[in-house]
Image (cartoon, helix red, strand yellow):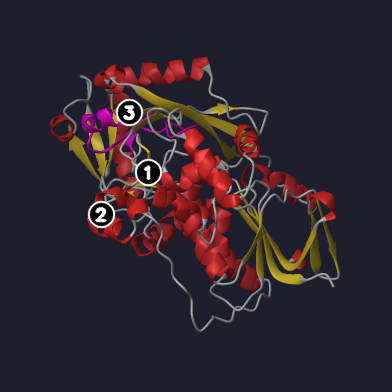
């Protein structure tokens, strides 16, 4: 007989996986559905990797509320789960007189949002913190709580913990239709697959409006907003000490320059509305604009080597706030319009959605035991396996480097392949270990890694390479 779950969640990005983890606290049968072959493969993996305080969100909005709540939740969760972070602080730089006169209102907005340690600093103080910035700074706004985070590890951590606590995961399940009958949502995927659940959560990101339409709602439209970024080599890392933020506009938070937890520097993103929800290609015009902006902010950065470029799509809508709605009669929660703050707000959104489901009648009986997890460290702030003699002595595979650019060992690759949420693609290994993410972009190590993955998963190398081309 067809199994009926208590809750089905559509979409396994940062938000969907956080919701799955939150619901795994309770005695529920929950299933997480994802169209792609792994979690965290959409907007989540291609963002700016900033853990936001929500200081610049519009006060009184749901986004401001959930960003602030999520920040508190993540302060506890991130160290527990071993998600790589660095607490550097953000420095919002005013380059014109008009921008400088905007700083008091931004400070007041931050304080209204509960981020009370934000303060205005002088031009001299800005240069004391960031001596390599270009000439012409008027002043700045210092935001101590802005931090770096690993956007790869976070959804992997949420999902791994959810699986450990009983959630089921169905990958390669693009939703094609939804029908409701007798209080049950029947979600149809490819090849006649069907998942049935008494409660339904739509966390489909770029496709959340299309899922919403299947349930008869037309409250918002997702317009994919492309953000292109440039990744600079690790030798550039010493150029800055903080996250260098621009004064935001009504359209975009603007172009920032930020370190990453992997030791690189990011420049970006652009903000361009598109028609195609699959267009993650970079553009000549976009990259040229970033270089122009970067040169104006941090001239020395232009002398550094570029490691990679990439683009992500954010789920922008015609509304200025999150589009999270409960349709109680359908026992359906829509989570749309999360845009660029999904990684930072995910835990707050998850808690909020859980409460909405309870409002719709979901019985939440806490489990006697909620199992915790500890993720492998792929950040630079703490020792990596190749730097741990005791670990190498116990298992020499942690001393056998496979990816020399990123110092990824055979032990880490094998762990990722055989983890509770196993890597089955090269992209999956990249996000779990950093392999193929460095200067050579896999030129020197990809063939070896393909052989390892093929051997461990009993797949043909050509099949794995074909998957990489379509990822």
Any part of residue 321 in sight: no
Q: Is residue 53 above or below residue 20?
A: above
How far apart marks 2 and 3 lie (CA) works out to: 24 Å
Name the spot of residue 321 as percent of width and height, x first.
Answer: 55, 47
Q: Are marks 2 and 1 in contact (CB under 8 Å)?
A: no
Q: Give the residues drawn in magenta, as a range.
A: 234-259
The disc at residue 233 is 3
Q: Nearer the viewer, mark 2 or mark 3?
A: 2
- Residue at the spot 59% in from the left edge and 51% down from the top edge: 457
- Residue at the spot 66% in from the left edge and 38% down from the top edge: 463
Quadrant of the rendering where the N terminus is positioned:
bottom right
Question: Which residue is disc 2 drawn over?
Answer: 388
The disc at residue 408 is 1
Magenta stretch containing residue 93, yes or no? no
- Residue at the spot 44% in from the left edge and 54% down from the top edge: 67
Which of the two labelled residues, at mark 1 and mark 3, occupies the earlier sequence position? 3
Which of the two labelled residues, at mark 2 and mark 1, occupies the earlier sequence position? 2
Quadrant of the rendering where the C terminus is positioned:
top right
Which of the two labelled residues, at mark 2 and mark 3, occupies the earlier sequence position? 3
Q: Nearer the viewer, mark 1 or mark 3?
A: 1
């Amino acid at each position: 007989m067809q199994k009926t779950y208590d809750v089905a969640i559509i979409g396994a990005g940062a938000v969907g996986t956080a919701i799955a983890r939150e619901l795994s606290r309770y005695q529920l049968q929950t299933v997480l559905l994802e169209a792609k072959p792994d979690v965290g493969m959409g907007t989540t993996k291609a963002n700016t990797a900033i853990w936001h305080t929500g200081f610049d969100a519009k006060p009184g909005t749901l986004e401001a509320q959930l960003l602030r709540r999520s920040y508190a939740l993540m302060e506890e969760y991130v160290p527990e789960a071993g998600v790589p972070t660095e607490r550097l602080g953000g420095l919002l730089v005013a380059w014109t007189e008009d921008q400088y006169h905007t700083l008091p209102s931004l400070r007041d907005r931050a304080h209204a949002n509960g981020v009370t340690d934000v303060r205005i600093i002088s031009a001299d103080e800005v240069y004391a913190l960031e001596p390599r910035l270009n000439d012409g700074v008027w002043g700045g706004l210092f935001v101590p709580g802005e931090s770096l985070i690993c956007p790869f590890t976070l959804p992997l951590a949420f999902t791994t913990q959810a699986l450990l606590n009983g959630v089921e995961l169905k990958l390669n399940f693009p939703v094609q239709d939804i029908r409701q009958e007798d209080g049950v949502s029947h979600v149809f995927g490819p090849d006649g697959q069907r998942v049935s659940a008494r409660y339904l959560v739509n966390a489909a990101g770029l496709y959340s409006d299309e899922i919403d339409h299947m349930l008869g709602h037309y409250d918002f439209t997702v317009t994919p907003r492309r953000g292109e970024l440039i990744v600079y080599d690790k030798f550039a890392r010493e150029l800055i000490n903080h996250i260098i933020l621009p004064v935001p506009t009504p359209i975009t938070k603007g172009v920032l320059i930020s370190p990453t937890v992997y030791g690189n520097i990011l420049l970006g993103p652009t903000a361009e509305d598109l028609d195609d929800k699959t267009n993650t290609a970079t553009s000549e015009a976009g990259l040229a604009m970033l270089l122009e902006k970067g040169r104006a902010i941090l001239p020395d950065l232009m002398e550094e080597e570029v490691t990679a470029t990439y683009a992500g799509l954010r789920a922008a809508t015609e509304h200025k706030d999150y589009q999270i709605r409960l349709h109680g009669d359908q026992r359906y929660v829509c989570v749309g319009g999360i845009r660029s703050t999904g990684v930072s707000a995910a835990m707050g959104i998850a808690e909020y959605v859980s409460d909405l489901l309870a409002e719709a009648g979901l019985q939440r009986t806490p489990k006697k035991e909620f199992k915790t997890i500890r993720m492998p460290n792929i950040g630079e702030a703490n020792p990596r396996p190749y730097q741990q003699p005791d670990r190498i002595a116990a298992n020499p595979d942690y001393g056998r480097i496979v990816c020399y650019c990123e110092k990824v060992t055979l032990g880490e690759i094998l762990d990722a392949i055989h983890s509770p949420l196993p890597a089955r693609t090269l992209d999956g290994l990249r996000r779990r270990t950093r392999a193929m993410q460095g200067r050579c972009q896999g030129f020197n190590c990809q063939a070896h890694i393909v052989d390892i993955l093929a051997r461990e998963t009993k797949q043909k190398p050509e099949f794995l390479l074909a998957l990489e081309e379509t990822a």
